[in-house]
């Protein structure tokens, strides 16, 4: 399969910019949604239920009459944060996954990327999966794997491994979003990589008139993101956060050339950031559907070769024992009861992390090699630094990470002054990652008397 790189027509870009209004201040009109679907189905009285909402999208459930019974369908109504592109990209991502992978995703029943119907906004109508989402313990921020049968866990991991392997085998040719000809209603046969659709590139950042791709490589993509951060700092130049961010941006600019090649045409993989626990629908010990394809982009291999989000996190390398959380008199240590519950869930997630990576190493060893590569670790840290360089809560951690990397580069230079661009990938294993630094600054509680945790790379050490 060949995926061509394309940019949108100038007319379409200008139209989208002129229509851009930012996030709506109010929810979509539910009566207009009922009117739209009622006319299509020939029924006057429809029951509509709001399932979820965010600054980009409202998701509703509606019962559709069919053969003397009702079938539940989903309608997603898009707020005008990124007219045309956001809807087209989501539909194309779903259709691509249906076409090339075995992962069960919802069928697109109808969609409107123009916002010209009674609803007044863009929308997508999808089939609804019958089943239960993965249970979550909100206080711990973890899936409650103790309530998910081993058979369901194995089914989920097998499906995800097959999906990640297939996307790796069907690599794309640029960084951006996928636009499939048949999905978007055009006459073009080839699928295309076009402008990127992500909150980082729309909302307030559209006013900066910077490129949204497609990008040839990581260097171009990251440079544009740094340019957006720089312009954001110029808008509020006299604050301490902005001044510190500008210094960080300057240091990241100097480091970019050591980590990323600006001359390459870089392969990418389709990457879904939205696979969250409530997106995973299970029924009868098997995976029946994966929802949530709102921000699915073609991203570089170092970014795309990543654990599913709900499997990410600190590795607990030892099965927690209650006795480690009790004092000499057998009473819970301060805060230990809550920690014990959280750590049990982390332990179960760590086992699934290992299961996933074991399966991936057999199914697609190239994927695992990229995931485990020290240069991948450095690049992921750099990506985090770009995203959060203007965040006061993470700036200190980013500065410490940059100092460590810069010191490591200087040591490499002194060891062999003749090599101006010596291999620096070893730094990925010898320095403490930025992800761990930020995690430790927010992980405020671990009351176990013998804690056994580590970064994701420690999952091989579980006992």
Image: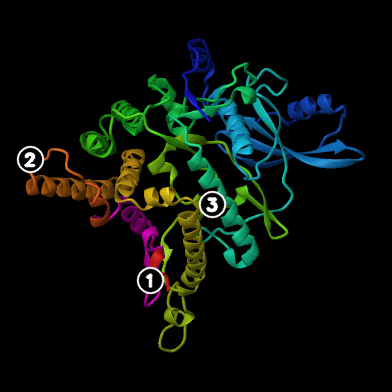
Q: Residue at x 37, y 27 (%)?
A: 216
Q: Secondary structure at mark 3?
A: helix
Label drawn at residue 104: none
Q: Earlier in the sequence, mark 1 or mark 2?
A: 2
Vertical relation: 125 (above or below) 186: below
Residue 13 is a magenta residue: no
The image's mark for residue 452 is: 1
Q: Is residue 24 something one can see in this rendering?
A: no
Does residue 375 sit above or below 29 in this rendering?
below
- Looking at the image, do the residues carrying marks 1 and 2 touch, with CB atoms under 8 Å apart? no
How many neighbours does mark 2 have within 10 angstroms: few (below 14), some (14-19), or many (20 or more)? few
- Which picture quadrant has residue 257? top left
Point out which mark residue 418 bears.
2
Badge count: 3
Residue neighbourhood size for the residue with mark 3, other residues' Cα within 10 Å, grouped as few (<14), some (14–19), many (≥20): many
Q: Is residue 451 magenta?
A: yes
Query: Which-is-in-front pick, marks 3 and 1?
Result: 3
Where on the picture, by quarter, is residue 191?
top right
Sequence-earlier tag: 3 or 2:
3
**Residue 361 image position (x, y, % from top left):** 45, 56
Residue at the spot 55% in from the left edge and 58% down from the top edge: 138
The residue stretch that appears in magenta: 431-459
**Residue 135 location, x and y as percent?**
62, 59
> Is there CB contact under 8 Å for labels 3 and 2?
no
- Foreground mark, 1 or 2, reads 2
Determine whether the residue tagged by mark 2 lies in a helix, strand or loop: loop
| Label whose residue precedes the other's in the sequence (3 or 1) | 3
Q: Which residue is mark 3?
A: 161
Residues at marks 3 and 1, CA–CA distance in whole angstroms:
27 Å
- 138 and 130: which one is in front? 130
Q: Residue at x 28, y 50 (%)?
A: 397
Query: How far is mark 3 from mark 2, CA to CA?
Result: 44 Å
């Amino acid at each position: 399969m060949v995926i061509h790189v394309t940019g949108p027509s100038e007319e379409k870009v200008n139209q989208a910019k002129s229509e851009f209004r930012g996030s709506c201040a109010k929810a979509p009109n539910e009566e207009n949604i009922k009117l739209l679907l009622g006319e299509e189905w020939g029924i006057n009285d429809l029951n509509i239920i709001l399932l979820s909402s965010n600054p980009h999208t409202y998701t509703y459930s509606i019962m559709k009459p069919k053969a003397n019974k009702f079938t539940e369908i989903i309608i997603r109504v898009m707020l005008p944060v990124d007219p045309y592109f956001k809807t087209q990209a989501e539909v194309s991502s779903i259709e691509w996954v249906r076409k090339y992978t075995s992962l069960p995703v919802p069928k697109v029943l109808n969609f409107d990327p123009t916002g010209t119907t009674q609803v007044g906004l863009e929308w997508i109508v999808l089939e609804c999966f019958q089943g239960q989402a993965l249970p979550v313990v909100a206080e711990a921020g973890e899936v409650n794997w103790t309530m998910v049968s081993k058979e369901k866990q194995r089914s989920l991991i097998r499906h995800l491994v097959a999906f990640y392997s297939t996307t790796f085998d069907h690599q794309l040719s640029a960084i951006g979003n996928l636009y499939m000809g048949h999905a978007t209603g055009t006459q073009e046969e080839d699928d295309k990589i076009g402008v990127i659709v992500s909150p980082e590139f729309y909302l307030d950042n559209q006013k900066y008139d910077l490129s949204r791709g497609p990008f040839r490589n990581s260097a171009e993509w990251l440079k544009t993101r740094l340019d957006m951060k720089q312009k954001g700092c110029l808008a509020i130049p006299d604050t301490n956060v902005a001044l510190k961010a500008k210094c960080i941006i300057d240091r990241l600019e100097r480091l970019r050339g050591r980590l990323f090649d600006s001359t390459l045409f870089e392969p990418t993989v389709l990457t879904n950031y939205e696979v969250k626990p409530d997106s995973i629908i299970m029924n009868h010990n098997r995976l029946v559907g994966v929802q949530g394809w709102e921000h699915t982009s073609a991203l570089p291999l170092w970014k795309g070769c990543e654990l599913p989000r709900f499997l990410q996190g600190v590795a607990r390398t030892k099965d927690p024992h209650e006795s480690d959380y009790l004092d000499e008199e057998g009473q819970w240590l301060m805060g230990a009861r809550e920690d014990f519950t959280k750590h049990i869930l982390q332990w179960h997630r760590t086992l699934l992390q290992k299961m996933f990576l074991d399966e991936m190493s057999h199914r697609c060893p190239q994927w695992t090699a990229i995931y485990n590569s020290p240069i991948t670790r450095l690049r992921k840290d750099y990506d985090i630094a770009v995203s959060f360089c203007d965040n006061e809560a993470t700036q200190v951690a980013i500065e410490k990470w940059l100092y460590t990397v810069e010191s490591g580069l200087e040591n490499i230079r002194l060891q062999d002054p003749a090599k101006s661009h010596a291999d620096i990938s070893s730094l990925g294993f010898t320095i403490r990652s930025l992800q761990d630094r930020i995690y430790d600054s927010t992980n405020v509680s671990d009351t176990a008397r013998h804690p056994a945790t580590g970064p994701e790379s420690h999952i091989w050490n579980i006992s």
